[in-house]
Image: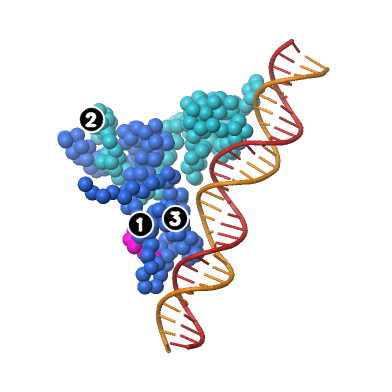
Chain colours: A cyan, B blue, C orange, D red
Amino acid sequence: MKEKRKLKIDRPLTEAELQLMTAIWILGPCTVKGVQTELAKEKELAYTSVATFMKILETKGYLKSFKSDKAHTFESLISREEYEKLSLGHMAENLFDGDHSMMVMKLLNDSHLSKKDLEAIRKVLNSRLST
Amino acid sequence: MKEKRKLKIDRPLTEAELQLMTAIWILGPCTVKGVQTELAKEKELAYTSVATFMKILETKGYLKSFKSDKAHTFESLISREEYEKLSLGHMAENLFDGDHSMMVMKLLNDSHLSKKDLEAIRKVLNSRLST
DNA sequence: AGACATCTACTAAAAAGTTAGTAGATTTGT
DNA sequence: ACAAATCTACTAACTTTTTAGTAGATGTCT
């Protein structure tokens, strides 16, 4: 049995926090400076602002940090995939009365999915159904 | 061509606002008192707090109100279905790089969907594919 | 070692979100 | 029409989020 650290997430990431985390997920272990640079593509933010957010995210349990040679290095404690899952679950609870299949239906009907997308989805669906 | 009022939604509803709107979607046109009562099942809130939220939601363009006999009656300007769609779109943008099909995949793989759910999804999928 | 750059910790302050009270207006029942 | 109840508008306070500055610590280069 694999050991599984469980991250307790009561509220989802705020908008700004999510932008930070997105940069961190792209970069992997990184410094404040690294995140600031990556983030700059989307949004300019003062070095100290980025640092503040990193600290907040650490306090909230999304990041851990350790002191490497010069600057602190930060590392995500939750993968993007995990967070995507949590986030979908949160949305399901809040907006779809917990019904995940409703969400799938809605996406199928409302999104502009290409034939290729739909085929890929069918493939996954079939493999889920054939077990 | 059907006339389509476009509701500009920059940010999604906040947690508390969504709870209000959920009550309003259940009730249809309603008063502050009605919403307070409906909401009480989930969360007790002072009459004036509910009134404040209604006003905020009106200012933000989610509700309109008109004075009926005694109290104001409020009415939603966006259906739950529309909001669900917007919300999914928002999440797609923020977390899935705009890729709706990724979201579907994730739901199929991560959610505990029953055989019945999966069959229903297949049905929708097939009808989307057969056009 | 001293000067310079960079980093962290602490502080702060504005904006948004959440919750509710007070007072004056309106309605209702008698 | 008057008293009681209810409603709206305005205000307020407290929390969280977002953003950044200042000062002191730490590391770098010569």
Q: Which mark is residue B76?
A: 1
Q: Are marks 3 and 2 on the same chain?
A: no
Label 2: element kind: helix
Evaluate whether residue A75 shows in this view: no
Q: Position of residue B39 (x, y in %)?
A: 42, 61
Q: Are marks 2 and 1 on the same chain?
A: no
- State the residue at coordinates (42%, 65%): B32
Residue A46 lies in what quarter of the image? top right
Task: Locate the C terminus of chain A and report the quarter of the image it occupies.
Answer: top left
Front disc: 3 or 1: 3
Q: Which residues are magenta?
A: B26-31
In the image, taking residue B84 as reference, residue C19 lies left or right, namely right
Distance Cα–Cα, label 3 vs label 2: 41 Å
Q: Position of residue C18 (x, y in %)?
A: 51, 54
Distance Cα–Cα, label 3 vs label 1: 12 Å
Q: Nearer the viewer, residue B24 or B9?
A: B9
Vertical side of B27 occupied by B94: above or below? above
Q: Which mark is residue A115?
A: 2
Q: Amino acid at mark 1?
A: Ser
Magenta-colored stretch includes residue B28: yes
Label 1: element kind: strand
Name the subunit of mark 1.
B
Magenta-colored stretch includes residue A46: no
Q: Position of residue B67 (x, y in %)?
A: 38, 68
Residue A86 lies in what quarter of the image? top left
Q: Residues within 10 Å of mark 3 (few under 14, many from 20)?
A: few
Vertical side of B102 occupied by A101: above or below? below
What secondary structure is the magenta-colored segment mainly? loop
